[in-house]
Amino acid sequence: MARIRVKPPRVRRSRWRGVAGYARRLSSTAVNPPPGVDYSAKWYVMATVSVGVLLATIDASIVNVAFPTLVDELETTFNTIQWVALGYLLTIATLTLGMGRLGDVIGKKKLYTAGFSMFTIASVLCGLAPDVSWLIGFRVFQAFGAVMILALGAAILVEAFPSAERGKALGWIGTAVSLGIITGPVVGGLLISAFSWRAIFFVNLPVGIVGTILAIRFVPRTPPVPGQRFDFLGAFLLSASLFSVSLALTLGQTRGFASPLILGAFGLSAVAGVGFLIVELRVDSPMVELRLFRNPMLSVSVITGFLVFACLSATFFLFPFYLEGVLGFDIGTVGLLLGAAPLMVGVISPWSGALSDRIGIRPLTLAGLVILAVTFLGFQTFAIDTTIPHYLVLVIPVGIGIAVFQSPNNSAIMGSVPPEYMGVGGGILTLTRLLGQIAGIAVLGSVWAASVAAAAGGSLPDGGASMADPAAQVAGLQTTYLIAAGIMVVAVIIGAWGLSKERSGLSLQEAPGG
């Protein structure tokens, strides 16, 4: 009698089980590198990515120093010249996730190398710009290159290092970011004084050439996971949503958040966002795997990261007004004082990242959040006669808190995504920071202005909150930083919940049921 072979039914494994199972594969990557990656070249990759991060970070801040000069020499207004910075920022915020996903689909090396080349060429064009319109256009072109560098750099770095050293690697990148924040305004001021505003763009040429050569030589050619497709409709809807909300938050500070234009932009962002969610849940190869966010490790890290950057951006936005307008320090002293916190970040980030590889991520991120919450409460002691030692005693812990929190938190995000979404993970890092910065300046900046007006008797002088009586400005600062402390307390609660989940035995590296 012939045997009848019954074929067992095919069980289709859900996409989420593949995502959750990624954590169980991490141990193997600590020994066996991904295809196309040589762990012995990891420090060369680190140097390459650090150059890119440093270049993009410096260029994001160096142009702010040139604003007064640009207004005079290009014969324009401050409202117009702001778009030199806003065009750059909005382009990066709009495209970062899409660029990260594109790198996952077609390969990261080619896009990263192209980004370096594009950034370098655009920098030269910015330096040659004949008027402000051309300068704004070239800055947008420059941002296309920058978004490739920023969105893909973290993913390239994580793939180049064993998983057991991921925190240490991202910690060193934190140092590069801090160095860029510190040196950008200083280098910009020196170049403008010695040459002209065009020099702040021409200086990118030799660095960009070196970075491009390093990218060609050392960035590993990691093959993308087969079978992936780029979700064009999802990318368009996400970009439309991100651009609209970023534009609304940015312009709402001057036009008012109740104006029809701003409300329309918020509405467009919401509609496009809902459309994006619908599309992503239906396509086979989504732009962003939404099921990733079922992982508490990722969700906690993204939410707390957003809250931290929102509070920090508002802090460093308001500090110059306080240091120069209230305390009366000259611009050189202000620049040095503003560098205190980033300096601490640069020193401590590698240490905190390496420590997170040894003792775990959640204890360090929670410790960083607690430090920031206590520090913002300490800002209530700012007064109209605060001394430099008093200021430093309050501000240096900010740098410590950022460093203790940020490198482990970045490691948590990058460790929560599977290989086929590593570029998206890098995009999430960049987008969390940018949206936090935009929202923090918009919301807490408005809170400060309203608080100053209330302390000044209900109205502000023609020059705005920065021209109000020093006592009113300090009262506004204290109110704003009290709210920031409250936001940090919320972040601490979320972080403590994440730690409790980890300690209770539910691995945050995989979702329930994974």
Image (cartoon, rainbow, N blue to C red):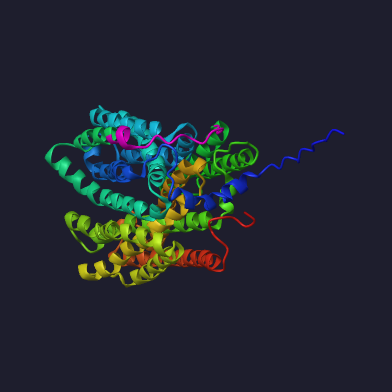
Magenta region, mostly helix, strand or loop? Answer: loop
Q: Residue at x 34, y 69 (%)?
A: 379
Magenta highlight on residue 347: no
Asked if residue 265 lies left or right of residue 323, the reply is right
Q: Residue at x 83, y 35 (%)?
A: 3
Q: Residue at x 45, y 35 (%)?
A: 103
Give the residue furthest to the right: 1
Q: What span is colored magenta in the figure? A: 214-229
Q: Residue at x 17, y 54 (%)?
A: 332
Magenta highlight on residue 226: yes
Q: Position of residue 450 (x, y in %)?
A: 41, 60
Q: Position of residue 245 (x, y in %)?
A: 49, 44
Q: Position of residue 369 (x, y in %)?
A: 42, 65
Q: Position of residue 298 (x, y in %)?
A: 51, 54
Closer-to-camera residue (105/204): 105
Quarter of the picture holding the N terminus: top right
Q: From this viewpoint, is residue 279 visible? A: yes
Quarter of the picture holding the C terminus: bottom right
Above or below residue 419? Residue 467 is below
Asked if residue 9 lies left or right of residue 498, the reply is right
